[in-house]
Amino acid sequence: MAAAKRSIVKKPRAIRATSLAAATTASVKAVLKKAQLGGGGTTVGILLEQASMAARGVDADQIAKDITAGVAAATGVKLKPTSTVAGGSILVGFAPPNTLLKPLA
Amino acid sequence: MTADGSSPRRVAPAGSALLCPSAQPDAADAVVIGVVDHAASPPEVQYLDEPTPVTPELLALARPVRPTEVYRFAASCQQGACSHWSGHDCTLVTRLVKLVPVASLALPPCRIRGDCRWFHQTGRDACRRCPLVVTQNQAPSEAMREAAAPGKPG
């Protein structure tokens, strides 16, 4: 509890732009490690660019639901929908469990 | 004056649009404002002391993952071209403030605050949650997933 309280009031410090490469490498390694542990879907995903789809009158959310239902019906694998937070180009993807690769292989 | 003791500096050219703090790297004026610390749980953005222009070399550093998974980019708010735009403000930050718990009571050492759409719209409430925002998040929390869904009222 005390540790949690400390962490929420800690004063964050900026990292130097000159350390950007090292920070990037560490971040990428952590992402890949999570993916290896099954916690991510960085190699397989379906991305729907919502802004441009909306401009064409296409509902990306509905497309995402249709894809999820279609894959589940065909393979029994339930895709995990992944929301993203972005400005300008909004993406909605899916981070399927790595096991998805097996039934489709 | 901000909580980290520095004054917000203008990054965007005078008279230009406010900056989206969770932009895509392909925007013409995109800069990197932070790197996501994925070793933290939940992942948390480490802000740069100076926004850095996006270069092909910088984007290549993120391979094999997507740049939006490891960097936070800022670029001019796309307003009507973005599905989070209500017509007069950003609904994304409204939902973030409503749904996502604060990351820290202290404001992050962000260098775009003076030009930030989110800060201009919701003030420090946005800044206290901003470190938790990963532009392309493969494993978002339920609150973040809900906040990220465009089209829902804020």
Image: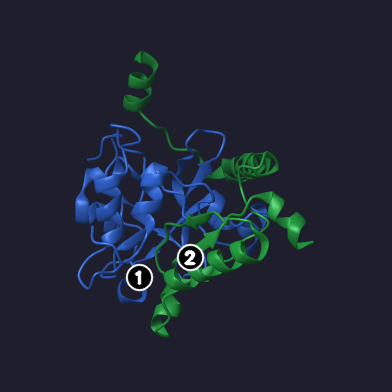
Q: Colour of chain A?
A: green
Q: Amino acid at mark 1?
A: Ser
Q: Secondary structure at mark 1?
A: loop
Q: Amino acid at mark 2?
A: Leu
Which of these two is toward me, A50 or B39?
A: A50
Place of residue A32 in the rendered image (x, y in percent of width and height, measured from the top left):
67, 44
- The image quadrant of residue B18 is bottom left
How packed mark 1 is, by other alpha carbons closer than 10 Å (few <14, some 14-19, many 20 or more), is many
Residue A100 position (above or below residue B14): above
**Residue found 51% across the figure and 57% down from its top:** A81
Vertical placement of A83 versus B8: above or below? below
Letter of the blue chain: B
- Image position, residue A10 (x, y; %): 36, 25
Judge from the rendering whether residue A103 lies leftward or rightward of residue A6; answer left or right. Answer: right
- The Cα atoms of the two marked residues, 2 and 1, are separated by 10 Å
User: Dot 2: what SS?
Assistant: strand
The residue labelled by disc 1 is: B83
Q: Which residue is mark 2?
A: A91
Residue at x 52% of width, y 33% of height:
B40
